Image (cartoon, rainbow, N blue to C red):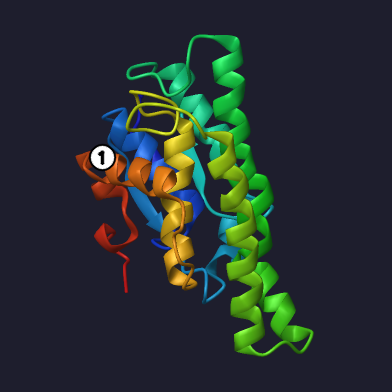
Amino acid sequence: MADTPILHGYYRSSASYRVRAVLNLKGLGYADAFHHLRKGEQRAPGYLALNPQGLLPALETEGDVLTQSLAICEYLDEVYPTPPLLPADPVARAKVRAFALAIACDIHPVQNLKVLARLRALGLDEAQVSLWAATTIEDGLDACDALIAGGRGPYCFGDTVTLADVFLVPQLYNARRFGVALRWPRLVAAEAACLAMPAFRAAAPDAQPDAE
């Protein structure tokens, strides 16, 4: 990268966690710009000028701004292909993408802060909100577990880390936050293999300068 990229994120943002992991796996340096989600800093005019969606993360790089974690991760994998995070085989690559999308599109959006705040506004109490999040996560992880059933190797799709693992690890972090009992040995084993790597440990929420 010609200039040091700037990652706009928040320590507990699972989407930011994904991008941090990829940057670390690629050995790329970056600067942090923190936006406290619970304080609504992602809706400040200055940030909305960068990302009109008001979502995290955003990556300033090469004079441009990239948004949406999967798009950012795939960009980084294309521009910095070592180590590759998508398989060379088209079918295998599609399966990894499908797993990542199952988390990014089907689990995460319906248990994020915006949705939980809307549920509270509709009159649900905290127990009901937590149950909503936990049930959503459980249903989604049941499907993710089925997607990798019968696979071999320490990671989701074999012997090397892929974007499937990059998306899984933050989602299991979220699952624990909502008190979900992790009943998926294959997913938990893949997470453990990832967390044995310095790149994932350095990307973890509690390792971030803005952690509370």
- State the residue in front, 149 or 75: 149
In the visual, does 76 lie left or right of 127? left
115 is higher (above) or lower (below) than 47:
below
In the visual, does 97 lie left or right of 120? left
Residue denoted by label 1: 199
Task: Indicate the position of residue 45 as horizontal and vertical percent values.
Answer: 62, 63
Residue under the image location 29 percent in, 36 percent down: 24
Q: Can I make out residue 212 in this image?
A: yes
> Which amino acid, by three-letter code, is at mark 1?
Ala
157 is higher (above) or lower (below) than 103:
above
Task: Indicate the position of residue 77 as horizontal and vertical percent values.
Answer: 45, 23
Residue projecting furthest to the front: 150
Quarter occupied by residue 207: bottom left
Residue under the image location 51 percent in, 26 percent down: 75
Q: Is disc 1 placed on a helix, strand or loop?
A: helix
Image quadrant containing the C terminus: bottom left
